[in-house]
Image (tube, rainbow, N blue to C red):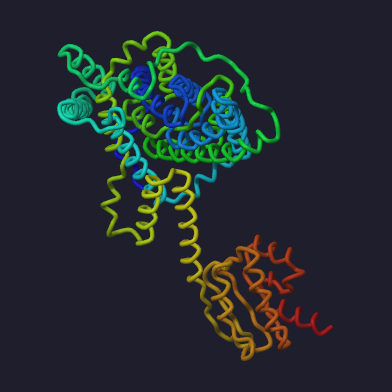
Amino acid sequence: MESPKLIAPSQGSIQSDIFSGITVALALVPEAVAFAFVAGVPPAVGLYGAFFMCLLTAVFGGRPGMISGATGAMAVVMVNLVSEGNALGAPGEFLGLQYLFITLLLVGILQGLAGYFKLGKFIRLVPSSVMMGFVNGLAIVIFLSQLNMFKMGGDWISGEPLYTMGILVAITMVLLFTIPLIHKKAPGALIAIVLVTIGITLFNIETSTVLSFIQTNGGTGIKAGLPQFSWPQVPMTYETLAFIFPYAVILAAIGLIESLMTLNLIDEITKTRGHGNRECIAQGFANFVNGLFGGMGGCAMIGQSIINITSGGRGRLSGITASSALLLFILFASEYIEQVPIAALVGVMFFVVIKTFAWNTFKILNKSPRWDLVIILLVTVLTVIFDLAIAVVSGVILSALLFSWENAKRIRARKFTDERGIKHYEIFGPLFFGSTTLFLTKFDAENDPDEVIIDFKESRIMDLSAIEAINKVAGEYGKLNKNIHLRHLSSDCTKLIRRARKICDVNVLEDPDYFVSVDNYRSHQLD
C-alpha cells in the first residue's frame, strides 16, 4: 500500500517538535472533551486522560512522533461501562467513574502482558488491503466526527452561524495549504489556528469557540487543578472482577489494535520503524496510571499523530511538548485556549482527513485483484459502522480465508513411472488443511505398481491435516500390500512426519540414492 502523501521524511528538529507539539495540544482539547462527553465522564477526566496517554507513550513508547490520547473508539465502550457501574451503586453515588478507573488498571496489565509476550509482532499479519481500508475508514470517521462541530445543542446550525463557520474552516484550510509554500518548516497548523483566532477577536466575529462548545455540552470550561492520586473506590470482590474483565479485554484489544495500526502507518509515512512490543507496554503503563490519577485512558490517535507528523514532529519531544502544553492549558491558560474558534480546529482536522485518505485506492481499482478491493471496502465500511477492532479482525480473517482458498487450489501432481517400474508423484504447492481434499484425488492406488514415491521437492507439509492425508494415502496403498515413500522433504517436514509416527507410518527417503533406500525398506518389510 502506498503511504498517504504527506511530507518528505526527515529527522525533524527541536524547533519542529516544539511547534508541532503545541499544535497537537490545541487539537487535543476539543477531542478530549468531546470523547469525555461520549463516555459519560466529566471533561477534566478526558483532559487528564489525554495528558497521561500523550506524555507516557511519548517517553516510553516504541514510536517517536506518534500521539496518544482519549479516543472515540474506546469511549464508545466506556459509556456502557460507566452506565452499568452507576447502576451498581446507590442513587447519586455515581460509581461508574470508579469502575472505569479500576477497569483501566486491568487494561494496563493486559496491554503490558501483550507487550511482554511480544504479541505486537502479529501486526505484521495485517495485509496491505486491510491497512488501506483502515486508513480510508478512519479518514471517514474523522470527517464525520468533525461534522458534529456544526451542531449546537444537538441541532444543526444554519443561517449566518453556518456561513461564518464554513468560511473560517475554508480560510484555515487555505492557510494550511499556502503556509508550507511560503516556508516549508513553518508550523502551518499552529500559525493557521493563531491567525484565525486573532481574526475573529479583532473583527468581533461571533462563532463557536472551545468554551461555547464545552458549555453547550454541559461543561463549564477546561480549567482544572493537578490530577490527584486515588485508588478506585469500588468493592474489591470477585463480582467486581467478573463485571470489569470483559470490558477490560475489549478496551485493551481496541487500544492495542488502533495503536499498532497507527504505528504501522506512521512507520510508512516516515520511512522508519517503530517497536510494537515496546508500544504495547507503554500503552499499558499509561492506561494503568490513568486508573490511579483519574484519567479516562485511551490509545494512539491517528488524526493527532498525522497533525504532528505533517507539522514536522518526529521525536519524543513533540509528544512531551503536546502533553506539557495541554497541562499548562488546563492549569493556567484556559481562558485563552477557550477563545480558540472551533472552526479553526475543524479546518485542521479536515486537512488531516485529506492527507490521511489513501487516494491511490482509486488508481488501483482496475489493477488489483478483485478480492483485495472487496477487503478494502469491507474494512472501510466496518470501521465507519462499528469500530476499528471489528474492522481489522474481520479483514484479517477474510484475507486469511481467501489466501487459504487460493493456495488450496494450487496443489497438483506430475506423474511418471521410471525404468525400475516405480511410480513417481511430484507434488507442487503447499499441502495443508485446505488442499488435502484435492491432494487425495491425485493418486490411483489400485492401478499403481507396488512401489510409489511421493516427491515433495516443490511442496511442503504444513500441518496435522497434511500428515493425516499422507497417512490416508499410505493406508490405501497398504491395503493393497503396496509401499509409498516420501522424498525430498525439508528438515522441518521430516521432523513433523517422524513425530507423527503413531498416526503416519511412512518411509522417508533421506539417502540421495533413493533406489537403495527403497530396496532396504522393501527388505525390511519382507523380514
Q: From where the camera sits, is residue 351 visible?
A: no
Looking at the image, residue 29 lies above or below residue 524:
above
Furthest toward the right, the residue is 527
Query: In the image shown, does 71 or 300 lie closer to the viewer?
Result: 71
Residue at position x 59%, y 40% in the image: 246
The quarter in which the C terminus is drawn is bottom right
Lateral position of residue 95 relative to residue 394, left or right: right
Residue 26 placed where, x, y %? 34, 20
Work out whether 433 lies above or below 257: below
Instruction: Give the residue displayed 54% in from the left and 23% down from the top.
Output: 92
Q: Position of residue 128 (x, y in %)?
A: 41, 50
The quarter of the displayed image where residue 371 is located? bottom left
**Residue lying furthest front:** 91
Left or right: 53 with respect to 18?
Answer: right
Residue located at (62% from left, 88% from top) = 448
Residue 376 is left or right of residue 487, and the answer is: left
